[in-house]
């Protein structure tokens, strides 16, 4: 017997370990027919709190479905997600943004939701212009989790103190020259820069391109601008730095799109360009004094668009696509979910839910609703999803801008590099 | 035993193993049995992945679609068409050249200080060793970033001394030094090895030299250092290999971007970016193999040079 035990020991242990490992990969239906879903997103604490509340409500209504949730910061989220997906352990329902929805749909990670639309997922009350943000290759690969638009968020106090005015009433607008004058005044007067240098994010360049009748990407996923345009834009932004109109390079280099690291929340600038879906974050992190204004424009076009700040997609490999679609529908369309989620992912995409949420809105949610309604007639349709490779373009854009602000390369040369790198990234 | 000697077969016959050898072979079986978890682990977790990565290095693989064979494309692109590859290689070279001597110098200096019997010397040894245990962790890198960023402890302290540099981590010309400092701070492991080496230096040699009138400095250069060269070689090889693979600090301090302006883009960080943020696993695998080759060559060169400067006790002077 001891001999046998010794011989059998190793394979037995191995088998046990293996089965334990396989069980760990789990998920899936358990014996009582219930289903376990994994739902992941990125975001801050506020978003996590309300999302988990909404998920709890969903579980209460669907006792057969158990939902495991997970969230993290933006960068960590995608690094983990891509590894999990590659390893076959991806989540069932996942959050994406414009840069990644094209990437993931193009690579076959996302399930085509077209067949669920009208069934588990209702889209009747979601504006088509918004839905277009989740359409890749003519198929609905993701559903917008909200609606957002660009804004200038600012603290009125330093602007008033510097004698600068910001057109924040509905219908008012301003030019880039007026904007430059205002932020330079703030920079000259106070201890903070007028605005956070916004040259690093391709998102705001996209707005400027639309103001000038151009686009970041063409309809067929190619680059829509040339180096000359980018040179012109970066030259305009760079003119703000010497007078402290825009933040110093050391501040700008730290920007990553998150509210907690932004120049304004770290009290280094009095304003910055952002998406109104982040307003709840500014409200809690900066203070309730924040207000919004439209982006400056020199043309009749505001360049601002109704965009899905984030989208929900279902994994192609999910074993429970129906259940995942059900959860997606609940988050997007259910009035109770809308009430809980508020404007944590922008205003609700469902127009009825939006009306109801905005009608009862207070504090930060009210700010978001107010901005959306003040700019309503200026907000154009969605720009559409970014193509495969756009995530790399976004990163290269920021990295090259770092070289510009630290004077390591001239603007024209930097712009050419961005275009060259982007053409390569989009071609692959 | 006598029995075996008598019946020992001639060479021509197939030799039945003598009992001793048979027993040894049986022992081997048990040894292999006990080793099997390790062997399985090595095969599954080291050799398997290495083979896979070698294969992937000749493919275009984006994590989601099946890998596509591209031959040497990744390697040629790297060498001829990727500026950031060369930039990362340059940053890493600077990092290795700065951090390794600094770290070893600190380790030796502190080992010399702690090589005396004083009260509480054990406490000091632990205290100096502690950073090595913590050093690779994310939390320490986070603390480091906070200390060296604008308005951080180091910035404030330097400003108080009239050196208004701003935060180191936010400026391309200083950011790499933050990482060098982080590496040098973790000198505990080589320090402990140096301490062990110092204990081996025969006291008689020092005493004899002292009688001959050699001062402390002369005794250090003529006795301590030569006696310590094998340990120096060991630490040097280990630290060079470690430094080439440095990742965590750069990753955390620059939020994974290698910034500002690519100034902290260490080679492993760029490799990681190519693999996990650009979804180019094939390319990243190729980079990993290039790193392996370069580290192997450099290690070989260090060993070669060792013939000229490493002195092993018992050897006669050459």
Image (spheres, grey):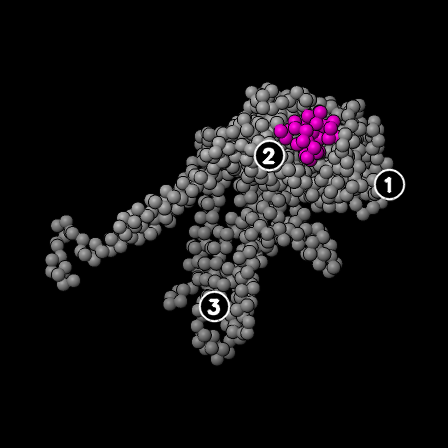
Q: Looking at the image, is mark 2 or mark 1 nearer the viewer?
A: 2
Cα separation, mark 1 vs mark 3, equals 69 Å
Q: Nearer the viewer, residue A98 or A350?
A: A350
| Circle nearer the N terminus (2, 1) | 2
Q: Which residue is mark 3?
A: B198
Q: Position of residue B210 (x, y in %)?
A: 49, 77
Report in which chain the residue with disc 1 lies. Answer: A
Which residue is rendered at x = 76% and y = 32% of the image? A360
Highlighted range, magenta: A330-358
Q: Is residue A165 visible?
A: yes
Marks 2 and 1 on same chain: yes
Which residue is rendered at x = 11% and y = 58% of the image? B7
Which residue is rendered at x = 69% and y = 54% of the image? B152
Report in which chain the residue with disc 3 lies. Answer: B
Marks 2 and 3 on same chain: no
Q: Which residue is mark 2?
A: A60
Q: Residue furthest bottom?
A: B211
Judge whether residue A341 is colored magenta.
yes
Q: Looking at the image, is mark 2 or mark 3 nearer the viewer?
A: 2
């Amino acid at each position: 017997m001891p001999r046998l035990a010794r011989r059998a020991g190793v394979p037995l242990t191995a088998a046990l370990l293996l089965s334990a490992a396989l069980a760990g990969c789990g998920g899936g239906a358990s014996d009582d027919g219930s289903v376990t879903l994994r739902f992941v997103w990125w975001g801050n604490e506020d978003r996590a709190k309300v999302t988990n509340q909404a998920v709890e409500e969903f579980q209460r209504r669907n006792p057969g479905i158990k939902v495991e949730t997970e969230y993290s910061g933006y960068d960590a989220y995608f690094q983990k997600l891509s590894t999990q997906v590659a390893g076959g352990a991806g989540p069932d329902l996942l959050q994406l943004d414009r840069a990644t929805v094209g990437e993931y749909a193009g690579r076959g990670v996302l399930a085509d939701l077209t067949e669920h639309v009208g069934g588990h997922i209702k889209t009747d009350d979601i504006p088509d212009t918004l839905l277009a943000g989740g359409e890749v290759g003519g198929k609905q690969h993701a559903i917008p989790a909200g609606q957002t638009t660009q804004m200038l968020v600012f603290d009125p106090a330093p602007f008033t103190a510097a004698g600068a005015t910001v057109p924040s009433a509905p219908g008012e607008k301003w030019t880039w020259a007026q904007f430059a004058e205002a932020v330079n005044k703030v920079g000259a007067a106070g201890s903070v820069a007028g605005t956070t240098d916004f040259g690093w994010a391709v998102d705001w360049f996209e707005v400027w391109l639309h103001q000038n009748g151009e686009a970041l990407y063409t309809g067929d996923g190619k680059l829509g601008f040339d180096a000359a345009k980018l040179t012109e834009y970066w030259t305009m932004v760079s003119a703000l730095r010497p007078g402290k109109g825009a933040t110093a390079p050391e501040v700008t280099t730290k920007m990553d799109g998150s509210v907690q690291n932004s120049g304004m929340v770290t009290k280094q600038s009095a304003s910055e360009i952002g998406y109104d879906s982040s307003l709840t974050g500014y409200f809690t992190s900066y203070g309730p004094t924040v207000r919004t204004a439209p982006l400056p424009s020199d043309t009749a076009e505001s360049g601002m668009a109704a965009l899905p700040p984030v989208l929900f997609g279902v994994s192609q490999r999910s074993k429970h696509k129906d259940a995942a679609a059900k959860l997606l529908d609940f988050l997007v369309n259910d009035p109770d979910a809308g009430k809980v989620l508020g404007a944590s992912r922008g205003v609700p995409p469902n127009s009825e839910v939006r009306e109801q949420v905005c009608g009862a809105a207070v504090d930060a949610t009210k700010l978001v609703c107010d901005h959306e309604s003040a700019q309503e007639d200026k907000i154009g349709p969605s720009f559409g999803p970014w193509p495969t490779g756009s995530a790399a373009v976004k990163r290269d854009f920021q990295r090259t801008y770092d070289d510009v602000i630290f004077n390591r390369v001239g603007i024209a040369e930097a712009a050419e590099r961005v275009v060259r790198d982007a053409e390569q990234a989009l071609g692959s | 035993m006598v029995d075996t000697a008598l019946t020992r077969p001639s060479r021509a016959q197939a030799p039945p193993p003598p009992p001793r050898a048979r027993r040894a072979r049986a022992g081997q079986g048990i040894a292999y049995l006990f080793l099997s978890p390790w062997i399985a682990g090595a095969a599954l977790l080291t050799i398997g992945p290495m083979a896979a990565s070698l294969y992937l290095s000749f493919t275009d693989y984006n994590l989601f679609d099946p890998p596509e064979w591209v031959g040497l494309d990744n390697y040629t692109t790297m060498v001829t068409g990727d500026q950031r590859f060369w930039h990362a290689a340059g940053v890493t070279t600077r990092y290795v050249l700065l951090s390794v001597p600094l770290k070893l110098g600190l380790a030796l200096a502190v080992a010399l200080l702690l090589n005396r019997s004083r009260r509480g010397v054990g406490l000091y040894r632990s205290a100096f060793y502690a950073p090595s245990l913590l050093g690779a962790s994310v939390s320490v890198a986070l603390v480091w970033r906070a200390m060296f960023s604008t308005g951080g402890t180091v910035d404030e302290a330097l400003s108080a001394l009239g050196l208004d540099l701003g935060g180191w981590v936010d400026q391309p010309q200083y950011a790499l030094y933050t990482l060098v400092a982080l590496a040098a701070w973790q000198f505990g492991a080589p320090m402990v090895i140096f301490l062990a080496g110092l204990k081996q230096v025969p006291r008689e040699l020092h005493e004899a030299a002292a009688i001959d009138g050699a001062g402390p400095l002369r005794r250090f250069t003529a006795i301590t250092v030569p006696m310590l060269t094998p340990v120096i070689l060991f630490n040097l090889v280990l630290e060079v290999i470690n430094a080439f693979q440095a990742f965590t600090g750069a990753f955390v301090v620059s939020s994974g971007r290698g910034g500002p302006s690519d100034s902290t883009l260490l080679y492993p960080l760029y490799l990681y970016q190519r693999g996990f943020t650009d979804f180019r696993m094939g390319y990243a695998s190729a980079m990993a193999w290039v790193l392996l080759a370069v580290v192997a060559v450099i290690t070989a060169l260090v060993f070669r040079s060792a013939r000229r400067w490493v002195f092993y006790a018992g050897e006669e002077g050459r």
